[in-house]
Amino acid sequence: MSLKGFYLLPHPPIALPEVGKGEEQKISATGESFHFIGEDIAKNAPDTIILVTPHGVMFQDAIAISYEDEIYGDLKNFRVPNVSMKLKIDKALTKKIYELAYNDGIPVVMATNSLLNKYDQSVTLDHGSMVPLYFINKHYSDYKFVHITYAALSDIDLYRFGIAIRRAVEDLNANAVLIASGDLSHRLKEEGPYGYNPYGEKFDKEFLDNLAKGDVKKVLSIDKETVCEAGECGRRSTVTLLGALEGNKFNGDLLSYEGTFGVGYGVMKFNVLSEDVPKLPELEDIRKTQHEKKSSQSDPYVRLARESLTTYCVPSMGNNLAVKVRCGLDSGNPMSST
């Protein structure tokens, strides 16, 4: 069995009435879209929901997959500790995803309490997971959960990890849906959390337009300046989801987009249209060409230094993942109210 649903969902705590206290009405379209997705997931009746979030305990150089019997979280950081949930983790699917990714050379780690306690952390549901699930649970709650926190890896590695997710679902004949949790630009308004930057609107439009068209190459080709200046936290989650769609022609239905509070909230449902040729080989060729072009055009002394670093200073990871906990904002601060 293959994945039965693919969704891009934002995670604004203010969308919850308990947090928004009336302010949620200013993003009512987002709330309505959340409920639509909840109803759609209920129709699919998955045994497992897989969610990729920016806001779990983030490792610098390895994707973290939570691996305990259960996972608990609440919204006490948003002054509503009574909003909480406890979910059973689908350990079989979690383990299979880990094994396939690890064997494919993708940096990944099993995030257990015994590991995270070394960093004064624990396996916990973050708001990037809880906000979408809050609305889904209104319509459907009979599922196990796979909790994944992305890392700042290359697009290719994140895409390949998405392929591993799909393969794991197929290998276990699992009945699952996949959610990419992420907000878009945090820089749409001066009064927003990070001020205004014109690249914010540019990123959101290009990103959503290309997703709607199912144009993976263009999604991954948005220039770095636009991505960096936009201040988003949903791109890497989405790249992972796109990997899970590898080998399929698809499009996306944009159910709503709002930037009322200076942060882009986009809700999209993806539709598989037909089989398609794999995109990964072309994406890898593009990356290789870009890397070679960049290397050949650089100052000869800089190029020599880069080659020396590549040759002598990048050790093989072997069986040991060089993991470093990073709980701050690379693409999203766990303490952010957005």
Image (spheres, helix red, strand yellow):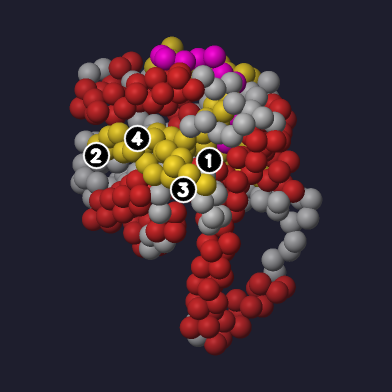
Residue 267 shows which numbered tag? 4
Image marks 3 and 1: residues in contact by CB distance under 8 Å: no
Give the mark toward the camera: 3 or 2: 3
The residue stretch that appears in magenta = 138-148
Specify the farthest residue to the top. Answer: 82
What residue type is disc 4 on?
Val
**Residue 120 in view, yes or no:** no
Q: Where is mark 2, residue-wise?
A: 259
Between 228 and 268, the one lying in front of the other is: 268
The three-letter amino acid code for the residue at tag 1 is Cys
Indicate the quadrant where residue 15 lies.
top left
The mark found on residue 249 in the picture is 3
In the rendered structure, does residue 132 fall within the stretch colored magenta?
Answer: no
In the rendered structure, the answer to whether residue 24 lies left or right of residue 235 reads left
Cα separation between marks 2 and 1: 26 Å
Q: Residue furthest right?
A: 319
